[in-house]
Amino acid sequence: MAEAALAPGGPARRRRRSWVPYALLAPGLLWLAVFFVAPMVTLGSQSLQEGNVYDGYTLTGNVGIYADAVGKYWPHLLRSVGYAATATVFALLLAYPLAYFMAQKAGRWKNVLLVLVVAPFFTSFLIRTLAWRTILSDTGPVTEVAQALHLTDLLQLLHLTNNDTLLSSKFAVIAGLTYNFLPFMILPLYAALDRLDPRLVEAAGDLYASPWQAFRHVTWPLSLPGVVAGTLLTFIPAAGDFINSRLLGNTQTVMIGQVIDSQFLRVLDYPLAAALSFVLLLMILGLVTAYVRRAGTEELV
Amino acid sequence: MAEHGAGDLRLTGLTKRFGDFTAVHPLDLTIPRGSFFALLGPSGCGKTTTLRMVAGLEEPSGGTIHLGDTDVTGTRAHRRNVNTVFQSYALFPHMTVLDNVMFGLRRKGDKQAEAKAREALELVQLGQAGGRRPGQLSGGMQQRVALARALVNRPDVLLLDEPLGALDLKLRRQMQIELKRIQQEVGLTFVHVTHDQEEAMTMADHIAVMNAGRIEQLADPATLYEHPASTFVANFLGQSNLLRARVEGGARDGLVRANTEGQELLLAADSVPEGLTDLWVGVRPEKLTLGEAGGRNRLGGRVVDASFTGVATQYVVRTPWGADLVVVQQNDGSARATPGEDVTLSWEPGREFVLDAAQDDHAGLDEVAVDG
C-alpha cells in the first residue's frame, strides 16, 4: 500500500493532481463570489435605482445621484479623510517607538508586550469606544489634568475642541480613532522591525552615521513595508468609521460612515447610501494607489 | 574625528567584563601603523570583543585605546576613523552596491564620494557591479563589497572580523592573497581577527595568539611556529609532538642532555630556559625523519597509521611507552613505511622547542578540533 502511494505518478495521478489547487481555491473563490462580488453588484445596482422602500425600486440608471451625493456630502467625505489621516499619523508616531522597542530591545518581554497589544481585542470595539467617554468625561481626571496644564486652551486654539472640556469634539474623535486602530499599526511595524538585522544599524554607526542618520538611512527604509502595511490597515477602516464620531463627537464632526449608516437605516434612502458607499470606496482606492506607488519607488525617504 | 594617518594603535590595560565573565583581561598591545596584524584564537577567546572595542561598538570596562596620540576610548563609533569589515558583511540590502560603498563618504560629506567609491570597487575588481543589489551577488562578491565599503574611507585602522569565514576553501585562499595585495597597495593598518591559523600566518606580519581573554604570544608567524611560548600556541598553530623530558647534566658544546622515558635526547642549550629541569620537548612533524639520517636524536616506534597526501606522507608512530608521534615525510622518492613496521625517528638538536612541563600538553587541541 505504502509503496503504491509513493510510486511515481502515472497519467491518472497527474490528472488528479491538476485539479487539487482548484479544489483548494474553491471555498475561497466561493466566499469572494457570495460575500464580495455579489454585494458589490447589488450595491452598484442599488445606487442606480429610483423609488422608495414601500413601493419598491426600479433600475433607472440614475447616474446623477453620484453628483448629488458628492455635492451634498463632500464636507463629510473630506472630514473623514482628514480625521483618518490625522489618526494614522498619530498612530504611526505612537506605534513606531513601541514596535521598535518590542522588536529590538524587549528580549524576553517581547511576547508579554505582544499579548498586551492584542489584549484590547478581547473586548468589543463598541465597549472600548464607550470607555473613552468615561476617560474623557468633563469631570474625569484626564480632563482636569488637561485643564490644569492648559492643554484644553491649546486644543481650543487649534479648533480641536469647542470649550474647555475634551469630550464631544474633533479631538475626542481623532483620539478614539487613533486608539482603536493602533494595534493594526503596531503589528505590521513589529513584524518589519523584528526582521531588521541590528548588525546593519551597527554597520551604519561604524560608517560614520550618527544614530539619527542610521535611523534615516537604514532602519526607516528597511521598515517601510511595515509602515505602508500599518498605515493602510489604519487609514482604510478609520476613513469609513462611524462609531467614534457618534460616541465621541458632536454634530460638527459627522463622518461619512455615519451619513451612510443613517441614510441606510433611518432615512431609508438606499440609492443615496449606496452611491456614497461607492464614492468612499473609489476615493480610498485612489488615495491608497497613489500612496503605494509613491512608497514603492523608495523616493519616499 | 581623529586626524588622518594618526599612527600606531595602542591598547593599554583594555578590559571587558560581561557580568561576572571577563571576556578580555587587561590587554596591552601596540599595533604599528601600516602593519597587517592578526588576532588569532579559538571561538570565545575575546578576539572579536577586542576588535569591537577598537571599533567603538563595545564599551571597554577598563583601559584605554589610543590612535596615535589621540585617546579614542570614549569616542563613539561614528566619530572614530576606524572601519570594520563584518563577519556577516552587514551590507545594506536596500541600497545598490555603489550606494553601500559611498555610505561612509556621504556621511562625512565627501564631494567626490562617487568617484572614490567607483575607484574602490575597481580595486576589489567589482567595477561592473555598482548598480546591483547585495542580494544579487555571490558570497565572495559581497565580501569584496564589504571590504570596499570600509576601505574607501581610508580609515586609520581597518578591522576585519573573520571576513573570510563564510567562504569556501578555494575562494578563501584567493581572497587571502587579494587582501594582502590590497593592504600593501593602500598601506593602511589592518587588524584581522580569525580562528584560522593558516589564514593568520599567510597574511599577517604580526600575530597575537589569544586564549581565554589573554594574549598567549605576540610574534611574527615564523617565530610563533618555530618557537611557541606555550603548549597552547604549539598545539593551536600547526601540529606538535610534545615529549615529556628531564634535564640531566649541564650544557656542553651548546647542548644539554635530557631524558625522555629512558631515551637520551640532546637539546640546544639556548632553547632551554635557565633553571628549568622538567620540560616539554616539542618537535614539529616535518622536522622528524624516518630512519637515522635526520640527526643525533633518535626514538624508536612502530608505524600505526600512514596516510598518503600526494605531496607528503603522514605517519603516526607509536613509541614503546604508548605516545603517538606524527611524522610528515616529503614525497622525495625515499622508501615509504607501512603500518606495523618498526622504525626509528631522528632529528638534529636545535630543531625542537622547549616548554615548561607545568603546562597542559593538551591546551589548544580541543579548540582546533571544534573549529574544523
Image: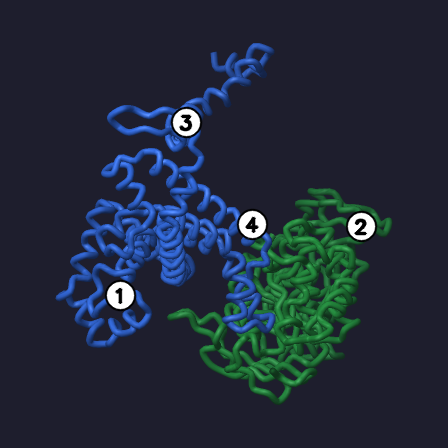
Chain colours: A blue, B green
Q: Secondary structure at mark 3?
A: loop
Q: What is the three-letter code of the residue carrying label 3? A: Thr
Label 3 CA crowd tier, 10 Å (few <14, some 14–19, many 20+) = few
User: Which residue carries the number 2 mark?
Assistant: B311
Which residue type carries mark 4? Arg
User: Tag 1: Cα neighbours inside 10 Å, few (<14), some, or many (≥20)?
Assistant: many
Badge 1 or badge 4: first in the primary sequence = 1
In this view of the protein, can residue A154 be seen by the observer? yes
Residue at 46% across, 81% down: B62
Same chain for mark 1 and mark 4? The answer is yes
Query: Picture coordinates of residue A169 (x, y %)?
Result: 25, 61
Pointer 2 and pointer 4: residues touching (CB < 8 Å)?
no
The residue wearing badge 1 is A161
Distance (Cα) linking label 1 and label 3: 44 Å
From where the camera sits, is residue B321 visible?
no
Discs 2, 3 touching: Cβ within 8 Å: no
Q: Quadrant of residue B321?
A: bottom right
List the residue tagged with mark 3: A60
Secondary structure at numbered mark 2 = loop
Marks 4 and 3, the one that precedes in the sequence: 3
The residue sitting at 58% across, 75% down in the picture is B277
Dot 2: within a 10 Å radius of its alpha carbon, few (fewer than 14), some, or many (20 or more) residues?
few
Left or right of residue B21: residue A170 = left
Q: Are marks 2 and 1 on the same chain?
A: no
Q: Which residue is disc 4 drawn over?
A: A293
| Picture coordinates of residue A38, whole percent (x, y) | 40, 26
Using the rendered image, report if marks 2 and 4 lie on a common chain.
no
Seen in the image, is B58 located left or right of residue B329?
A: left
Q: Nearer the viewer, residue B223 or A282?
A: A282
